[in-house]
Amino acid sequence: MIARIKKRLLSLLPLRSLRARIFVLILAVGIIPSVLMRYGIVENYEERAVEQRVNAVQNQMKILASHLISNNYLNHDRPEEQTYRNSREVIDAELELLSNLYEGRVMIIDSSFKVVRDTYEISEGKIMISEEVIRCFQGENISHYDSAHGYIEMTTPIVDTRAAAQPGETGVIRGVMLTSISSDSIVSTMEILNRKALILEALMIMAIFALAIVLSIVLTRPFNRVTEAINEVQAGYSDESISVPDYVETVHIVDAFNQLIERMRVLDDSRQEFVANVSHELKTPMASMKVLADSLMAQEDVPAQLYREFMEDIVSEIDRENQIITDLLALVKMDKKVQDLNIVSLNINDLTELILKRLRPLARKKDVEVVFESLRPVVAEVDEVKMTLIMTNLVENAIKYNKNHGWVKVVLDADHQFFTFQVSDSGIGIPEDALSHIYERFYRVDKSHSREIGGTGLGLAITKSAVLMHRGSITVTSTEGEGTSFLVKIPLMYIAQ
Ligand code: ADP
């Protein structure tokens, strides 16, 4: 289910190519942080610049506030007094200076919320009741930055420390200074900074873009080399094993491919060998027939008796040719898939009896005694035709490769999982070095002897294939000159794969 969804998502993505993915990945990894960095630097600068500006102005305002108090600026009982007028002028000048310096407006509001001084001279004498002013009278310093309109607004309390009743108290708030200053200089510095960062960012993006192109090409090149090498092998330019050692991954792919090629080569070789063997085996009886026929043709007035003898020889060669073809067909059928098995529940004791009955005439010819020992009744799930082939081949061989007056013993046994079928004989035996070859197609220990007794060299190859199809095993023990014993072990219940 998950795999299906993944496949669907992948098919929706236009990024099926590894090169495109690497390119996008590098681009994303390079560009996103640089954009975030520029944004972070500019934002951070703005925050810090506003904070610094507020602190500087607040300090100035606090100094001014203490001047206001010391000069009784807010409530002087004799405003017409010369000294008061002088100090007021000084403070006004100070106010003017500050408002010019910070491009701002300062309003001084007394405890009855009346604006006693406005550097813009617009609101003087008016009543100013705003949330900020009220909160400042309650002892809260407020600063507020309006980036949209480009100004910073703050309040500073005018504290009369002389009126502190107790030593721990700070004093009485006599008035409030409402200051608003322009943040244009901050904004313009920010713009310059932003522009520089943008140029840097553009340069970085270009560099990352170039890097992404180069890396996506370079990093995927080994995979192209793998494809090229495989194509070369496929086109037949090279039959050597390929090597692309750039990445562990390419090494794995290439190793797997080389193994596959090697297996194909082995298969191809064995197929060629098989075809050569088949042709040779089929040609031999043909050649004999031709020799026989030619010699008949070469003579005139051949006596009927000789004719008959030659014809009998020709018939036996035809029989042999037939036998080889029948065996070959049986072998080809074995090579087909396992589903060709026709599994039925079969009484193996009965089957063995039947096969031995068929082969007894052959045994009688050599005066070979065939003994059947059944240790228990066996019923197993097998393919009847193939099981018959297995048993017939083994018993037939035991008779064929026996000495005159010898014996063949067939023992049938079973446990809860397998049944065993053992064929022992008192025959000529198999040399040790030949034991590992006897299951090969067309292999015969003694070619001429085997041919004499009608062997094709395919019997055991067929037997082994049939045993393996039943998920069984076949083993052989033999002593030259004494005899041979084949043991076949097959599961009682057929296990489908
Ligand atoms: P063939 O058709 O020649 O009998 P097989 O494949 O059945 O071919 O056997 C291969 C070879 O193994 C035989 O040619 C023979 O030399 C040897 N062999 C098989 N079974 C026996 C046996 N019971 N005793 C001795 N040799 C045997």
Image (cartoon, grey):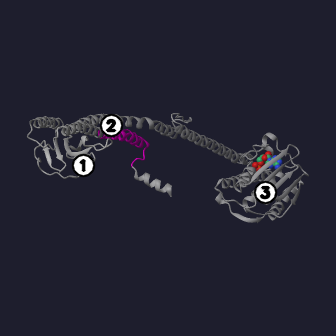
Q: Is mark 1 within 8 Å of ligand 1?
A: no
Q: Amino acid at mark 1?
A: Phe
Residue 307 falls inside the magenta stretch:
no
What secondary structure is marked by label 1? helix
Q: Residues within 10 Å of mark 2 (few under 14, many from 20)?
A: some
Residue 22 falls inside the magenta stretch:
yes
**Residue 395, position as x, y percentages in the image:** 82, 55
Q: Amino acid at mark 2?
A: Ile
Q: Is residue 301 visible?
A: no
Residue, disc 1: 137
Between residue 340 and residue 30, name the one nearer to us.
Answer: 30
Q: Residues within 10 Å of mark 3 (few under 14, many from 20)?
A: many
The C terminus - image quarter: bottom right
Q: Earlier in the sequence, mark 3 or mark 1?
A: 1
Q: Amino acid at mark 3?
A: Met
Q: Residue 364 bears which disc, if any?
A: none
Between residue 26 and residue 290, name the one nearer to us.
Answer: 26
Residue 244 position (above or below residue 149): above
Marks 3/1 in contact by CB < 8 Å: the verdict is: no
Q: Please state if 349 lies on the left or on the right of 105 as rendered.
A: right
Marks 2/1 in contact by CB < 8 Å: the verdict is: no
Between residue 179 and residue 225, name the one nearer to us.
Answer: 179
Q: Using the numbered discs, state the Cα–Cα distance from disc 3 to disc 1 in whole angstroms.
A: 115 Å
Segment colored magenta: 14-43
Q: Is residue 96 visible?
A: yes
What secondary structure is marked by label 2? helix
Residue, disc 2: 205
Residue, disc 3: 391
